[in-house]
Image (cartoon, coloured by chain):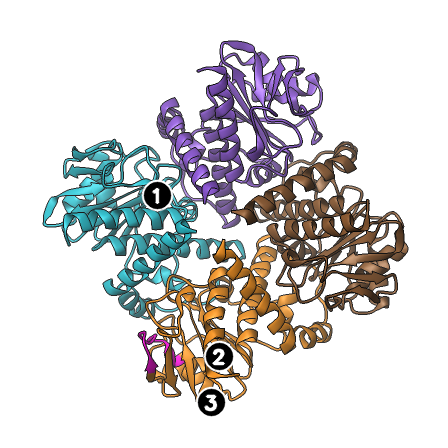
Chain colours: A purple, B cyan, C orange, D brown
Amino acid sequence: MTKDEAKQRLIDAGLVLDAADLGDFTRGHVSVRVPDDPGHFYMKPHSFGLDEITFENLVTCNLEGEKVAGGGPRHSEVFIHSEIYKTRPDVNAVIHAHPKHAVAVSATGRPLRPWSQPSAAFADGIGIYTDTIDLIRSKEMGAGVAKALGSHKACYLRNHGVAVVGRSLEECVILTIMLENACEIQLLVEAAGSPGPEFSHEDVMKLHDKIARPEQHIINFDYLVRKAKRRLAR
Amino acid sequence: MTKDEAKQRLIDAGLVLDAADLGDFTRGHVSVRVPDDPGHFYMKPHSFGLDEITFENLVTCNLEGEKVAGGGPRHSEVFIHSEIYKTRPDVNAVIHAHPKHAVAVSATGRPLRPWSQPSAAFADGIGIYTDTIDLIRSKEMGAGVAKALGSHKACYLRNHGVAVVGRSLEECVILTIMLENACEIQLLVEAAGSPGPEFSHEDVMKLHDKIARPEQHIINFDYLVRKAKRRLAR
Amino acid sequence: MTKDEAKQRLIDAGLVLDAADLGDFTRGHVSVRVPDDPGHFYMKPHSFGLDEITFENLVTCNLEGEKVAGGGPRHSEVFIHSEIYKTRPDVNAVIHAHPKHAVAVSATGRPLRPWSQPSAAFADGIGIYTDTIDLIRSKEMGAGVAKALGSHKACYLRNHGVAVVGRSLEECVILTIMLENACEIQLLVEAAGSPGPEFSHEDVMKLHDKIARPEQHIINFDYLVRKAKRRLAR
Amino acid sequence: MTKDEAKQRLIDAGLVLDAADLGDFTRGHVSVRVPDDPGHFYMKPHSFGLDEITFENLVTCNLEGEKVAGGGPRHSEVFIHSEIYKTRPDVNAVIHAHPKHAVAVSATGRPLRPWSQPSAAFADGIGIYTDTIDLIRSKEMGAGVAKALGSHKACYLRNHGVAVVGRSLEECVILTIMLENACEIQLLVEAAGSPGPEFSHEDVMKLHDKIARPEQHIINFDYLVRKAKRRLAR
């Protein structure tokens, strides 16, 4: 993938995340590692919405969280991204958002239950960062989030939001939407009273291994991009 | 109905199901038996959304679940469709989707309660498939779903989704939307606390027999197609 | 008001009710008494959506529920309308719909609580029809609904829907939306646990007397018509 | 800021509040103090929606709640605005709305919990007006709301709605949306059962002090205006 292709993918990811209502004003953000340059990443700029990323305003940062290029301002919570990239060489994309159902699940203090297919994508565990409800505005705090994330695909920031990672940007976007979907279903079940019997962890892991395959994420991401663009073209 | 009319109906059904938010990315699917050829069915292709079915990309499968024609890829869960068509000669359409309220009801482990008119359409029972949360990717698993469905109109796949059938494609689409509507109302009632008195099964069955009439399904389906197309034309 | 003006108002009411998602496929209906002819009413035709009423397809019925003019088919549940018009000379418009939150409240078996301003519009009571979940397809059943309605503005049809009346069509539409809004808030409060202290009935009735004034209903209805038409024009 | 710029901001605020579904027909209202004239304020007119404010119809009122200029009618609840402006010289904008989740939280009788970032914006407290569910149609009642508001950013009107204030119009709009978001998350958590551990008040106040900064409100407001206008232009 060329650098321009990666930038275009970031712009497209923003459209998809906006269509999924994950913006929280301008406060959600998404980044992708620069192709062939693992020490840098492209990131949505501060002061713009997820649906407003452009080649001109997106920012390039290094793993210290410093902006090294780009027309827009840098998010102060850049350290969620930089510290995860630093500790997770397998990760090529990071999203931080405040999805309402995931925030609510984090506030219940209960783990994600295997009550839906999207929940199975996280059957190998989700981290939880409980140091503070505050913004993640230092390397130390970013490192705390990265530590809470561990080797997982996602991490709750309790009463704040989520950090979700992907081997690809496509995976990262789809996992973020799946996590929110799984959390919504969990809240519906819990609100309705006692849950029924569950499948065994072994059974859920069989689905996990299928649902988490990279090519499926790309297929679903590409569809959501087409759909978002059709919507905007109407 | 000609083969081309059946294909156009499948395309229209996709638009309606998409407008009802039943896609779950590209993961929901719908099929219809080929007119005058009960051993084959047309099906939404993998890798496309419900709103993207075309004459070119839709696939034709036989009752072994094999693709015999069509431009798009086949869903690996084709066996939900093929095994139901095999065991249910009265069925001419199948939908598999992951509607959030139906998945949540399946996770509560409780039956559908007669708390709304759409619930009455299922007053003669709903099956529940509890073998696995996993994808239905073999004939054996598809046969398991068909067995759980039995002679019913619909079947929960616990913590996964639903399989809904119809004597016609129109019926299948309307029943799928009605089931999700009924499940949403059930969850609202359960979340709000204890339910009030219910009508007798005999009373609910009187409504069942009216609400399940084929011509009503066609009228409602045709309306939803008009509405979806008006929305897309704006 | 001329007859044509009344018909146009019915068409507009359909657009507003559709925008408020009160259609339930083609199954919700609305009617208005013919100006200067209290023995007849104009009604949305069967087989069309609330957003599809036209001068040509709307039907004129008499108080026996018989269609006497109009291009479209008559709803079989016409008797909800005809029997209410027969017993309530003060009523000039009737709506029957299946709003999900109102249906859920009816299924809880609990009365509407004064937990929101729209609930105050119904502080003088709501009827509840509990004879059957079935469709209201006879004069006798329609008379049962009219009896359950009594002198109220609205009546639940338990586990089925609502019948709402108005001195004007505008009032009828606004009250229907307010009832659904009030029911949604009630379900939110009940789901969240025990409610807090309430205002006295006397206090709520002070609001009732203001919020139920005819000119406010017309102002709000006219706004919703403008809004619905702007949406359709985009 | 010139007077015309303030009027344009009021028009824009209406578009944003409408897009956030805070209208309740024509019943929500918003006002902004006239620049360099603290004894007067511009306000949305009665009989129009939040998305229909124009230079011609907006009204200018004094601190007695009297209309002194403007083409549209004055809201009878103007006294919520005038009495707050009278007692809070730091306040330059007021919104009164009936957001469903905030109304529901007010009806639970429970305080706002620090379970989400937007809730932290109100960590220094929210007032609650409990005198009546009735409309606020006198100076005395408006003064009661202002007293319940005290030095806070927002005030519930129990079982009725909210009054939210801002040092700027932008702040006022963003805070109103944040309060509704926080209330929705609180209801989700409460419906799902017992909440988990919370952060200390000190920790939440650290976020409060960052999230409540004026320039962030302007950035987010400006984004929502762009987004609302793009939506209307489609």
Give the Cα separation between the discs numbered 2 and 1: 38 Å
Q: Residue at x 89, y 49 (%)?
A: D36
> The residue under label 1 is which amino acid type?
Asp
> The residue under label 3 is which amino acid type?
Pro
> The residue under label 2 is which amino acid type?
Ala
Residue A169 spot, x, y in % from top left: 48, 23
| Res. B99 visible in picture | yes
Q: Which label sits on residue C38? A: 3
| Res. B122 visible in picture | no
**How many numbered marks, from 0 up?**
3
According to the picture, the residue beneath numbered tag 2 turns out to be C6
The chain containing the residue under callout 3 comes to: C
Q: Residue at x 24, y 64 (%)?
A: B215
Q: Give the magenta range.
A: C69-79
The secondary element bearing badge 1 is classed as helix
The chain containing the residue under callout 2 comes to: C
Q: Are marks 2 and 1 on the same chain?
A: no
Image quarter hosting the N terminus of chain A = top left
- In the depicted structure, whether residue C88 falls above or below residue C73: below
Of residue D190 and residue B100, the one placed in the foreground of this image is B100
Q: Residue at x 70, y 49 (%)?
A: D176
Residue A20 spot, x, y in % from top left: 50, 39
Q: Which label sits on residue B51? A: 1
Left or right, residue B164 beside residue D166: left
Residue A14 spot, x, y in % from top left: 53, 31
| Disc nearest the viewer among 3 and 2 | 2
